[in-house]
Image (spheres, rainbow, N blue to C red):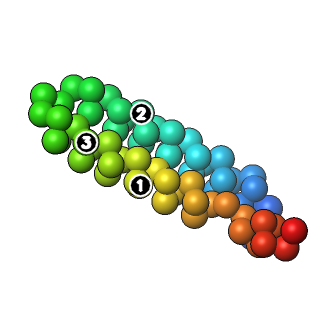
Amino acid sequence: MKDSSARLVALEHPLINIIAIILLTIGYIKAKKALDNGNAGKTVLLFYSISLVLLLSRIHWSLWLNM
């Protein structure tokens, strides 16, 4: 795919969103199984932060800024 906008919409956006959802689920499950509340909070923070960065990285910002 030579067109970057088409690649973003057709491939990268859905794939990264699925990966982010999987990371959110893994973080939630690991936090639920953690015995220590401190470790559970750190686990949630780590996995949710990575997911947020992934989601924000695939937003087509030029469309939002040109409105």
The residue at 67%/60% (across/down) is 59
- Residue at the spot of label 1: 50
Q: CA distance from mark 2 to mark 1?
A: 12 Å
Q: Earlier in the sequence, mark 2 or mark 3?
A: 2
Image-based side of 33 in relation to 25, left or right: left
Residues at discs 2 and 1 in contact (Cβ within 8 Å): no
Looking at numbered disc 1 in the image, what kind of residue is underneath it?
A: Ile
Numbered circles on residues, count: 3
> At numbered mark 2, what does the secondary structure look like: helix, strand or loop?
helix
Q: Disc number at residue 28? A: none
State the image coordinates of residue 16 (x, y, percent, origin top left).
Answer: 56, 51
- Residue at the spot of label 2: 25
Residue 5 falls in image quadrant: bottom right
Say which of 18 and 53 sits in front.
53
State the image coordinates of residue 26 (x, y, percent, origin top left).
Answer: 36, 35
Q: Disc number at residue 41? A: 3
Which class describes the residues within 10 Å of circle 2: few (<14), some (14-19), or many (20+)? Answer: some
Q: Is residue 52 above or below residue 30?
A: below
Looking at numbered disc 2 in the image, what kind of residue is underneath it?
A: Thr
Is there any visible trace of residue 1 in the rendered image? no
Say which of 14 and 61 sits in front.
61
The residue at 41%/33% (across/down) is 25
Which class describes the residues within 10 Å of circle 1: few (<14), some (14-19), or many (20+)? Answer: some
Q: CA distance from mark 1 to mark 3?
A: 14 Å
> At numbered mark 1, what does the secondary structure look like: helix, strand or loop?
helix
The residue at 34%/38% (across/down) is 27
Q: Is residue 18 above or below residue 59?
A: above
State the image coordinates of residue 57 (x, y, percent, origin top left).
Answer: 57, 64
The residue at 32%/51% (across/down) is 46
